[in-house]
Image (cartoon, grey):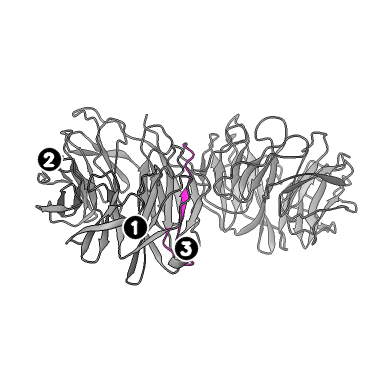
Amino acid sequence: MLRTRFPLLLFTAVFATAPGHAQTQPTFFQPYSLGNSGNSLATADFNGDGNLDVAIAGSDLTVALGNGYGSFHSLAPLAYNAAQIVAGDFNGDGRPDLVLSVGNQVVFLPGKGDGTFGSQEIIGVFPATAIAAADLNHDGKLDLLVNSKTVLVLLGNGDGTFQKPSSTGGTTSGRIVIADFNRDGNPDFAITAGIPPVLQVFPGKGDGTFGAPQTTSLTGGTAGSFAAGDFTGDGIPDVAVPTLTGTQVYIGRGDGTFTGGPATAFSGNYLVAGDLNGDGKLDLVSGSPMAVLAGKGDGSFKVPAYTYQGGGAAILGHFRKNGPLDIVANGLYYRNFGNGKLDDPPSFATPYAGLSSNVASLRAGDFTGDGKIDLVMVNGSSTPNPTVAVYPGNGRGGFGAYIETSLGSSLANTFASEIVTGDFNNDGKLDIALSVYYSSSQQMVVLLGNGDGSFRPPIVTAGFQPLLAGDFNNDGKLDLAVSMSGGIGILLGNGDGTFSLKTTLPVAPSFSQIAVDLNRDGKLDLVVPPNIFLGNGDGTFRQAPPIVNAYANWTVSADFNGDGIPDLAMSVGGLDVWILLGNGDGTFRAPLELSGVDNQDFPLLIGDFNRDGIPDLAAGTKILLGKGDGTFSPATTNILVSPDAWDLVVTADFNGDGKPDFALVFGNQVMTVMNTTP
């Protein structure tokens, strides 16, 4: 897997040290993935442990077993490219089964009660665009409604087989919703159909047959993803239909017909009804965009103030024991706090899925000014042009819907590279600098932050690639070290987001250069392995003796032995980590080699991961615990349950508990791994 290298700016980390103490082992929580992003879901207790599980149909069939606490373990996917899925006990053995549409077949999978399923049995040879299940004829056996050009009834025999299908005459391109719309005690079904769309309710006769439909015209409806429920509290089912401009409720009369009701100015899709805030009034969940519309009890809803990350076809369930209704949508789990507010998922897809290039750079910082750590990333694609996406942190380890900034049409057909962050115009808001390139042409782009996750139009300067930021002339304005023709250039900041070239250091940039005050004179120095440049405090530097003549993938600095002098840790050759203890004058002792780390091209990261006040190292998948004397011991746990899986990684305190966590990018997926050390 390609590991994108990017420069790091890490000033010396200072920790209290306590040599000779017993080391606490750090622990981490990796969020379980539901393993699929399909748009048809079913929920049941598939393994009989008393906890709700989820089955997700998509390019394959995945069963994610819930543990009753909001986490899931996905079983090996089954090779069914299913379009629709429904769960129920169709063979009467007390175990949930599945019925799914696969190509031109509808098949039955008998549940074994352990989360797995027996051999398939073909129910019918016809395509199905919608499936719903209920006891339509009051015989205690589950029946099916299947849309296949027309809505078909398949009466269940109670053993997993079904009688020959009979047509109801209805047809739909969307879902089938079963409810007792005319309050006669028999299940009816509703569909949307036609252009312009209409709502049709087929009254059930209680024997598995249905009468002629009652038809209601839908104003501006986008037929398909409607939801049914008693939104007015009168005991009669109503329907909510998404429109091009909002969400329209049609109030049930109790005879299968409806009258126009309130409209809410929020246009969602994949609507699902449930009481998410516990007030006894039905709310609506929009699966796309993911949002909760709180019901007022009169058929109207509050316009949601927040849309959540991800989204798609949604299903509700009590996935936590005695907890409120939570949501699973498009393979993501959304925890409900009980008031209708959701937690953003800790794992999600980036906006760059489907592009020819993955995320090129990842950084963490407070770009929205709310005191919570956000993520910023840039895509490396040249089509149509690079974009920057900020994911606002929610302070709990999750992230909200991204805020995207385009670099503009003038930079079309260019590729973006690494991000450097800092406040370049001294307005208290984080800015970013990055490079874009095409062929041999290279340009530096500075984006000044607005403090809300968005950025002002780019400031473009030709010929530079930003490497790191620091105040090299001690004037209180951030400067940049850049890669340029002839070596490393020092650009002094003007305090307004622009820069002026001061000097050029005649050395090629390393993969990981850092700025740190090595000789403790109050002036930033540069480490460009194996070269050392001591700062003069005016933006110029003098070269010191080199440290070691070794290829360094990554270099970071902290006081590893507690003497108040900056030390270095270097990843050498992608296999070993060297510790170089500083002498306080810009020189270092002989390196201490930490062999067998096998961090490959992963960055070295610093943090007090076990909360003992001593700096530790994250090297690839491993944590190296500092002893406070410059030596380290490997932790017994890795960062990930499945190691060697990511392309980019940053560390920050994403949930505000004072412990460094991780955010990882692998392919076009982002995951936060929380530090759970006591």
Q: Is residue 366 magenta?
A: no
Q: Is residue 104 visible?
A: yes
Quadrant location of the C terminus in the rendered image? top left
**Which three-letter amino acid code belongs to the residue tagged 2?**
Gly
Mark carried by residue 408: 3
Q: Which residue is mark 1?
A: 3
Residue 91 image offset from top left, x and y in percent? 71, 46
**Which three-letter amino acid code belongs to the residue tagged 3?**
Gly
Which residue is at a point 25% across and 48% down the rendered structure image? Answer: 597
Q: CA distance from mark 1 to mark 3?
A: 27 Å
Q: Which residue is mark 2?
A: 584
Pointer 3 local density, CA inside 10 Å: few below 14, some 14–19, many at least 20: few
SS at badge 2: loop
Dot 3 or dot 2: first in sequence order is: 3
Residue 150 in which image quadrant: bottom right
Q: Are marks 3 and 2 in contact (CB under 8 Å)?
A: no
Q: Is residue 382 visible?
A: no
Front-most of residues 312 and 415: 415
Q: CA distance from mark 3 to mark 2?
A: 46 Å
Front-most of residues 400 and 119: 400
Q: Are marks 2 and 1 in contact (CB under 8 Å)?
A: no
Q: Is residue 386 magenta?
A: yes
Q: CA distance from mark 2 to mark 1?
A: 34 Å
Residue 64 image offset from top left, x and y in percent? 55, 45
Residue 262 image offset from top left, x and y in percent? 78, 43
